[in-house]
Image (cartoon, helix red, strand yellow):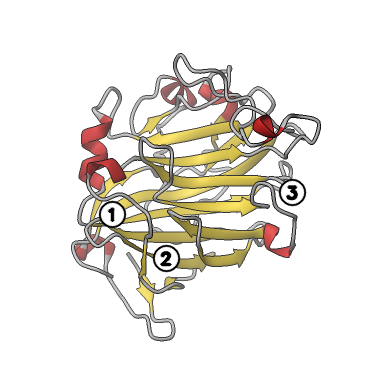
Amino acid sequence: MRVIAVGTFFAFISLSRATRVLWDGRAPFNYTEADLDASDGPYLSVVKGTQNASHYVSFLGHSVAPTPLWAQPEQTILSTIDNTSIFTPGSSPPQTGFRRGEIIAQPYAGANRTIFDSEIETGISTFHFSIQSVKALPLNYTHEYQVVWIEPTDGTHVFDLQIGTPFNTTPSAASHDLKIRTHNRTVIFSTPFVPEQWHNFAVVVDWTRLTVRTFYSIGAGHLSAVSPTVANTGVTSGADGQGEFHFGILKLPLIDPSQPAAEQGDVVHFGIQEGDKEGLLYSGVFVEGAGTEI
């Protein structure tokens, strides 16, 4: 990973020499939407609405340039949601409060993802992702969006990238910021979501010491440390604290004042959803092992 000094923070690690890629989600040019529909290759595509995965996710070939941060050729990924994006998890009720369309990391189709998660989430690992807005498919910043995260089986997040207004709060200028949050939703880095620019992140997770640290750049800029290493308060150690690596769009509702209090608190199944199709661009999504703290 390429990084440079910022304040008292300093690190420089060559991706090719000092670290190894544990999972690569940078879409090759021969990867197709039919592959995605079959959950083939590195992407599990089951968290979506009633349509095929390719209704919500597109691989853009050479039409949209990926982040310039990495030399590896890749297709930019367009992830969208619309009013059909209601996920039904197994035999549970549909999640009608949410709009969801996500890709989950996997090593290959049919792999044991519990084993895979333990392999990429041990020691110290760095989660890379770049994100860009889509002018024709804007988000509604009065809502909360979670757009990258690691999710253990208890439904919490090891960390996440959040945009918009946190659920049941008042919109503010910060609603337009990209925010990296720890397990207990503490914001450790925030930056304006400047349109038509790639925003590059690397989140370093120490699975032994239970800490996180964030690196960031915009466009072709080298990644710089933008937070200290902080305790990931409340996160669970060991296998119970490991989980699936998601990227894509999870849109939370607004509270519906006409609903009873119990339903207002059930964000998964109740609330108000506004608008229709919204989208984000993703690039440079991969996980590398870091051996020692960066």
Locate residue 193 relative to residue 61 in the image: left or right. right
Res 241 → quadrant:
top left
Q: Is residue 281 above or below residue 187?
A: above
Q: Position of residue 84 (x, y in %)?
A: 65, 22
| Disc 2: which residue | 214
> Disc 3, disc 2: CB below 8 Å?
no
Looking at the image, tell me whether mark 1 or mark 2 is earlier in sequence order: 2
Camera sees residue 68: no
Which image quarter is the C terminus in? bottom left
For label 2, the SS is strand
Q: Amino acid at mark 3?
A: Thr
- Residue furthest to the bottom in view is 7
For label 3, the SS is loop
Mark 3 and mark 2: Cα distance apart in space: 26 Å
Q: Amino acid at mark 2?
A: Thr
| Disc 3: which residue | 142
Locate residue 231 relative to residue 278 in the image: left or right. left
Return the mark for residue 288: 1
Camera sees residue 31: yes
Mark 3 and mark 1: Cα distance apart in space: 34 Å
Q: Nearer the viewer, mark 3 or mark 2?
A: 3
Q: Position of residue 200 (x, y in %)?
A: 49, 60
Which image quarter is the N terminus in? bottom left
Res 98 → quadrant:
top right
Locate residue 86 relative to residue 76 in the image: left or right. right
Looking at the image, tell me whether mark 3 or mark 1 is earlier in sequence order: 3
Which residue is nearer to you in this view: 239 or 234? 234
Q: Nearer the viewer, mark 3 or mark 1?
A: 3
